[in-house]
Structures are given as structure tokens and as C-alpha cells.
């Protein structure tokens, strides 16, 4: 009966370990930031690189989450003795099965902050992916607009060239009649050459942008790439423009998520300065066989609580805390710089339109989808 219970406990331990592993490695089902991007955008190399960084960040989430779960190990061994002269009756073989589960409480406590840091880092990588998608679409739109603009200008230049040639033919008749000087004819020819050079330049510009458009569109037919009218999305005033820019700027949002991740890493590093408490459960089963065909079994299941107080580590952990605090300050400066850059790009008043100062009051709030929202009021 006791042997059956021991086997059942081993099976239960293995099943529990499998369930813990499946829970810890469960992939995130949230959107990765591609949204409804066209296929040719999603297959762009730059977008694929950003997408792989999101996958790497998700893997780091699983790694960080592992600190919250106990480590479960199963160890089995068998030893056959050729010549055992240590006891009166020689031992012929020994079998051991050990199921152990251990959890560092201090590490799990610090792992909460580590899991949050990894989560914020994943959100930052998703913003970088969205920024990559937006950049591809923007470059594609700019190339298509440049082609349309150059095509219209080329058509105007061709009309002007035809008019200048007609005018030149009439002036030649006047020159033949002695009513016009030769220098004036040369001036008209120079204007025609200038228009022709401009047409050549526009043709080169069209060719260059078509090549860029093809590189961005990939296998997608360029004629199928259509632009939408963005007039309805244009902000009504400067405050709205700055608020939308701060809310939607992927680079700024990425920096804000990285700032929150750095803050959690500081908390994680600080918790490692405290003493480490670990709890473990061990269920070893051993069986010894002797030459006299007799055998013995033993079961020494135990629960163990360990306390480890580090006295000296060469200053490594203090240096890790200092390092993480420096990274947090660096990321804070990055957020500030990107915020100021966003304000200066979208406002005529530059820094005066940033969310600070007495001329405007700004409200900052947090939501599920974005780290920060700025609303003018």
C-alpha cells in the first residue's frame, strides 16, 4: 500500500510539473502591433525584424515568469556493484528515485517586478513594430504622392515646351523678315532647353520613386496601392495636433514603456539585496538489493526551509542596482527628449506647446492600451 502511495505521489508530481510548465510558457494571445496592415507591409524586412523583436520580448516574459514558479526535478539512478566488501552481505545494486520541488521566496518576490518589466518591454517592442509599419506606409504614400506631383509637373512642362516651339517657329519667320534679332531667337531656344532639362529631371524623379514604390510594395501590384483622403483626420487646431502626436507617436510611446520597464528592473534589483528564503520539498525513494536476495526500501520525504544571508559578493548586487537606476534615468531623459521633439515638430511655438509651462494645462492619464495620454484643456 505504501509503495502504491509513493508511486501515486510521483505521478502527481510529474503531472503537476507538466501543468506548471504549460502555464509558464503559455504564449501571449494579444495582437502584435501589425493590426490590419497590408500583406506587402507585413512582409517588409524592416517590419519582419521588428516583429521578431516582439517575439523575443514575449520569450523574455516567459523567462521572467519562471521565477514565480517552483523548480520541479525528477532524478533517477541505478547502481550495480561488482564487488562490495564493506558489509557482511554484499550489496549488488542500488536504485534511487528523487522528486524535489523548490521555490526561492525572495526570487519569486523579485520576479513579480521582473515579470512586469518584461511585460512593459514587450509593449515597447510592439510600439516599435507599429512605428515600423507606419514608417513603411508613410514612405509608400510619399513616393506615390511624389510620382503624381512629378507627373503633373512633367505634363505642364511638356505643354510649355510645345508652346515655346510654336512661338519659336513664329519668331523665326519674323527673324527671316528682319523684324527680330538673332539673340532673341537664342533666348527662346535656351528657354526650351531649360524646360527640356526640367522634363528630364522630373522623369528621373518619377523613375526613382517608382523604383522605391516597387521596393516597398514587393510583389503587390503598384496600381492596387491606393491612397485614402486624409482630410478628415487633420486636427482642427494646434493643441489637438500636439495631443494627437503625443498620443500616437510610436517612438515616444516605446520610450515611455521602456521607462516603466526600467523602473520595474530597479525594483527587482533592489529586492535582491535582502536575505534569500527558499522552501523545498523532497521525496527520495531508494531500494538496496543484497546477494542474499534480501532488499531494503527507504522513504525520507522532507520539507526544508533555508535562509541565506549574503555577507560579501564583491559589490556585484549594489552595482546592479546602480546600473538599473542609471538605465532608468537614461530612459527618463529619452522620454523627455522625444516628447520635446514631438512638440517642436507639430507646433509653431516649439517647446511652449509641450505638456508643461503656465500657458497650457495638461492632464496625464493611464489606460490599458497606452502608457500615457495628454489632453489639452
Image (cartoon, rainbow, N blue to C red):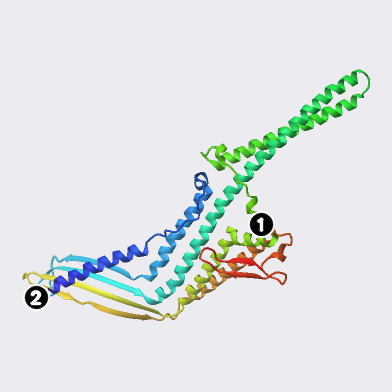
Q: Quadrant of the C terminus?
A: bottom right
Q: Is residue 297 left or right of residue 282?
A: left
Q: Is residue 352 left or right of residue 232?
A: right
Distance from disc 2 to disc 1, alpha carbons, whole Å, reads 95 Å
* Rendering quarter of residue 98: bottom left
User: What element does badge 2 sit on?
Assistant: loop
Q: Residues within 10 Å of mark 1 (few under 14, many from 20)?
A: few
What is the residue that sits farthest to the top in this orientation?
176
Q: Relative to 363, is 54 above or below? A: above
Which residue has dot 1 on it?
A: 235
At a point 52% along the width and 39% down the height, the residue shown is: 220
User: What element does badge 1 sit on?
Assistant: loop
Q: Relative to 181, is 45 above or below? A: below
Q: Residues within 10 Å of mark 2 (few under 14, many from 20)?
A: few
* Rendering quarter of residue 375: bottom right
What is the residue that sits farthest to the left in this orientation?
292
How far from the left and from the top, in percent, is residue 37?
A: 52, 49
How far from the left and from the top, in percent, is residue 26?
A: 37, 61
Q: Which of 78/267 is in front?
A: 267
Q: Quadrant of the N terminus?
A: bottom left
Q: Is residue 147 left or right of residue 78?
A: right
Q: Relative to 372, is 215 above or below? A: above
Q: Looking at the image, do the residues carrying marks 2 and 1 touch, with CB atoms under 8 Å apart?
A: no
Q: Which of 347/102 is in front?
A: 347
At a point 63% along the width and 39% down the height, the residue shown is: 209
* Rendering quarter of residue 96: bottom left
Q: Is residue 39 left or right of residue 239?
A: left
Which residue has dot 2 on it?
A: 88
At a point 44% along the width and 81% down the height, the residue shown is: 311
Q: Of circles 2 and 1, which is in front? A: 1
At a point 22% along the width and 69% down the height, the residue shown is: 10
Q: In terms of sequence position, does the residue under pointer 2 or pointer 1 come before the other?
A: 2
Amino acid at each position: 500500500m505504501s509503495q502504491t502511495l509513493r508511486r501515486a505521489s510521483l505521478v502527481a508530481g510529474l503531472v503537476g510539473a507538466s501543468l506548471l510548465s504549460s502555464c509558464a510558457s503559455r504564449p501571449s494571445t494579444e495582437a502584435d502591433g501589425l493590426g490590419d496592415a497590408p500583406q506587402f507591409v507585413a512582409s517588409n524586412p524592416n517590419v519582419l525584424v521588428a516583429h521578431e523583436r516582439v517575439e523575443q520580448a514575449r520569450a523574455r516574459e516567459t523567462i521572467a515568469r519562471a521565477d514565480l514558479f517552483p523548480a520541479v526535478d525528477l532524478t533517477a539512478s541505478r547502481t550495480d556493484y561488482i564487488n562490495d566488501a564493506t558489509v557482511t552481505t554484499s550489496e549488488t545494486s542500488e536504485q534511487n528515485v528523487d522528486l524535489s520541488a523548490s521555490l526561492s521566496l525572495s526570487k519569486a518576490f523579485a520576479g513579480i517586478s521582473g515579470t512586469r518589466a518584461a511585460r512593459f518591454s514587450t509593449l515597447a517592442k510592439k510600439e516599435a513594430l507599429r512605428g515600423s509599419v507606419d514608417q513603411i506606409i508613410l514612405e509608400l504614400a510619399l513616393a506615390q504622392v511624389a510620382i503624381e506631383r512629378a507627373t503633373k509637373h512633367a505634363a505642364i512642362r511638356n505643354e510649355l515646351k510645345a508652346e515655346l516651339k510654336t512661338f519659336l517657329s513664329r519668331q523665326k519667320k519674323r527673324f527671316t523678315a528682319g523684324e527680330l534679332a538673332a539673340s532673341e531667337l537664342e533666348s527662346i531656344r535656351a528657354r526650351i532647353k531649360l524646360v527640356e532639362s526640367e522634363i528630364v529631371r522630373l522623369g528621373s524623379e518619377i523613375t526613382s520613386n517608382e523604383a522605391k514604390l516597387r521596393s516597398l510594395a514587393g510583389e503587390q501590384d503598384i496600381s492596387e496601392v491606393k491612397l485614402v483622403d486624409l482630410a478628415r483626420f487633420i486636427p482642427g487646431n494646434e493643441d489637438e495636433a500636439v495631443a494627437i502626436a503625443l498620443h500616437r507617436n510610436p517612438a515616444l510611446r516605446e520610450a515611455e514603456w521602456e521607462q516603466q520597464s526600467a523602473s520595474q528592473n530597479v525594483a527587482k534589483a533592489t529586492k535582491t539585496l535582502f536575505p534569500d528564503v527558499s522552501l523545498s520539498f523532497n521525496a527520495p525513494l531508494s531500494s538496496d538489493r543484497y546477494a542474499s536476495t534480501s532488499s531494503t526500501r527507504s522513504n525520507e520525504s522532507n520539507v526544508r526551509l533555508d535562509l541565506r544571508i549574503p555577507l560579501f559578493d564583491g559589490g556585484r548586487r549594489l552595482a546592479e542596482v546602480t546600473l538599473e537606476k542609471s538605465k532608468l534615468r537614461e530612459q527618463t531623459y529619452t522620454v523627455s527628449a522625444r516628447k520635446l521633439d514631438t512638440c517642436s515638430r507639430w507646433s509653431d511655438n516649439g517647446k511652449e506647446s509641450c505638456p508643461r509651462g503656465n500657458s497650457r494645462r495638461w492632464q496625464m492619464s493611464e489606460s490599458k492600451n497606452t502608457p500615457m495620454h495628454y489632453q489639452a484643456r
